[in-house]
Amino acid sequence: MSPIRSLLLLIAIALAACGPAPQTVAGFVIDVKSTSLTEIQSFTLRTQDGQELVFRVGPLELDGGAFPAGHLREHMALSQPVAVAYREESGERVAYRLVDATWLQP
C-alpha cells in the first residue's frame, strides 16, 4: 500500500472513531420527563419552524454558561428559549450541552 493510501486510511479510521457529529438547535421547552425535580430523563423542544424534537439527556457539559438539565423546568415555565448541542446516537438525539438562546423571542 502506498504511503498516501496508508495516510488516508488512518485519517478515515480516526474520523470514524470520533463518533457522531455534534449538532445544535434552539427553541422552547414544551415538555420535560423526569424521575425527580433534578433528574431529567428527556425533554421536548419546539423550534421556531414548529418542529417538536425529543432529546434524551446525556452527560452534560456545564462550563461557559451551560446549565444543568433541572433548569429546563424553569425555562419551560417562563417560556425562555434554550439552545441544545446534541449527537445522534442509535436513532436518538442525546443532549450534551444546554444554554440560554437569548436571540430567540417567545
Image: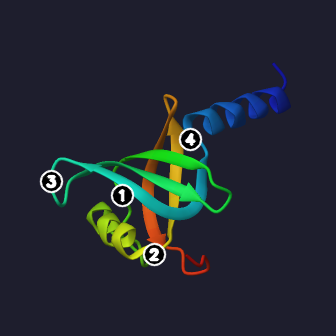
Q: In this picture, is 101 found above or below 25?
A: below
Query: Which amino acid type is marked by label 3?
Result: Ser
Residue at numbered disc 1: 60
Percent x, y of residue 4: 84, 32
- Tell me the CA gap for discs 2 and 4: 33 Å
Q: Residue at x 31, y 72 (%)?
A: 74
Q: Decide which of tag 1 and tag 3 comes sooner along the chain.
A: 3
Q: Decide which of tag 4 and tag 1 comes sooner along the chain.
A: 4
The secondary element bearing badge 3 is classed as loop
Query: Which amino acid type is marked by label 1?
Result: Leu
Q: Decide which of tag 3 and tag 4 comes sooner along the chain.
A: 4
- Tell me the CA gap for discs 1 and 3: 17 Å
Q: Residues within 10 Å of mark 3 (few under 14, many from 20)?
A: few
Q: Residue at x 62, y 37 (%)?
A: 14
Q: Is residue 25 left or right of residue 42?
A: right
Q: In this picture, is 80 found above or below 73?
A: below
The circle on residue 18 is 4
Compare residues 63 and 16 and report the one nearer the observer: 63
Q: Residue at x 52, y 30 (%)?
A: 91
Residue at numbered disc 2: 80
Percent x, y of residue 71: 30, 69
Asked where in the image residue 6 lies, by quadrant, the reply is top right
Query: Which amino acid type is marked by label 4?
Result: Cys
The secondary element bearing badge 1 is classed as loop
Percent x, y of residue 78: 38, 76
